């Protein structure tokens, strides 16, 4: 005769993440990261003046046939945004590791600017 013992694992309590007080005090956008943005397409309304009021990074593909990369180039010039042009198309699937690297750098730059590190 065998005895079967059943062990039930209690789930860990879910707690809200701690929010740094500097983020609460900021009350503003910290930064934007835009992937192949269609901000200058003819059928879209124009951006309001002052809407880009924080550091902005754009990642776009040179071979994008959905949103021409010239739109991101013009946008980056106008708003003094950081621009990364990659040898890829609109979906950028083949550049996910590179985009991940850019995103990690982007987050570290925000931390440094706010004095978190």
Image (tube, rainbow, N blue to C red):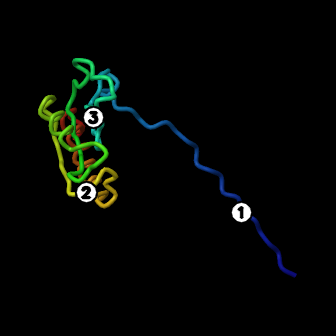
Which residue is most to the top?
49
Q: Are marks 3 and 2 in contact (CB under 8 Å)?
A: no
The quarter holding residue 20 reads top left
- Residue 12 horizontal side relative to residue 99, left or right: right
Quadrant of the frame with the C terminus: top left
Estimate the spatial distance between the alpha carbons at disc 1 and disc 3, rounded to whole Å: 47 Å
Q: Residues within 10 Å of mark 2 (few under 14, many from 20)?
A: some
Q: Circle 2 sits in a helix, a strand or a loop, which is it? A: loop
Mark nearest the camera among 1 and 3 is 3
Q: Which residue is mark 2?
A: 88
Estimate the spatial distance between the alpha carbons at disc 1 and disc 2, rounded to whole Å: 51 Å
In this rendering, the answer to whether 54 lies above or below 2 is above
Q: Position of residue 94 (x, y in %)?
A: 31, 61
The quarter holding residue 71 reads top left
Compare residues 104 and 39 and report the one nearer the observer. Answer: 39
Q: Position of residue 87 (x, y in %)?
A: 20, 57
Compare residues 107 and 21 and report the one nearer the observer. Answer: 107
Q: Circle 3 sits in a helix, a strand or a loop, which is it? A: strand
Q: Which residue is mark 3?
A: 32
In this rendering, the answer to whether 94 lies above or below 117 is below
Quadrant of the frame with the N terminus: bottom right
**Mark 3 / mark 2, whichever is N-terminal:** 3
Q: Which residue is mark 1?
A: 7
Estimate the spatial distance between the alpha carbons at disc 3 and disc 2, rounded to whole Å: 21 Å
The quarter holding residue 43 reads top left
Q: Tag count in the figure?
A: 3
**Mark 1 / mark 2, whichever is N-terminal:** 1
| Residue positioned 20% across, 41% down in the render | 109
Compare residues 50 and 17 and report the one nearer the observer. Answer: 50
**Mark 1 / mark 3, whichever is N-terminal:** 1
| Residue positioned 24% across, 47% down in the render | 60
Q: Position of residue 5 (x, y in %)?
A: 77, 69
């Amino acid at each position: 005769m065998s005895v079967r013992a059943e062990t039930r694992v209690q789930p860990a309590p879910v707690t809200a993440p701690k929010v740094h007080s500097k983020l609460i005090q900021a009350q503003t956008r910290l930064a934007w990261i835009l992937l192949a943005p269609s901000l200058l397409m003819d059928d879209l309304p124009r951006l309001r003046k002052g809407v880009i009021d924080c550091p902005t990074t754009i990642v776009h593909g040179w071979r994008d046939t959905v949103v021409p990369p010239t739109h991101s180039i013009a946008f980056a010039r106008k708003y003094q945004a950081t621009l990364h042009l990659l040898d890829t198309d609109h979906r950028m699937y083949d550049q996910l590791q590179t985009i991940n690297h850019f995103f990690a750098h982007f987050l570290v730059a925000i931390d440094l600017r706010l004095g978190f590190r």
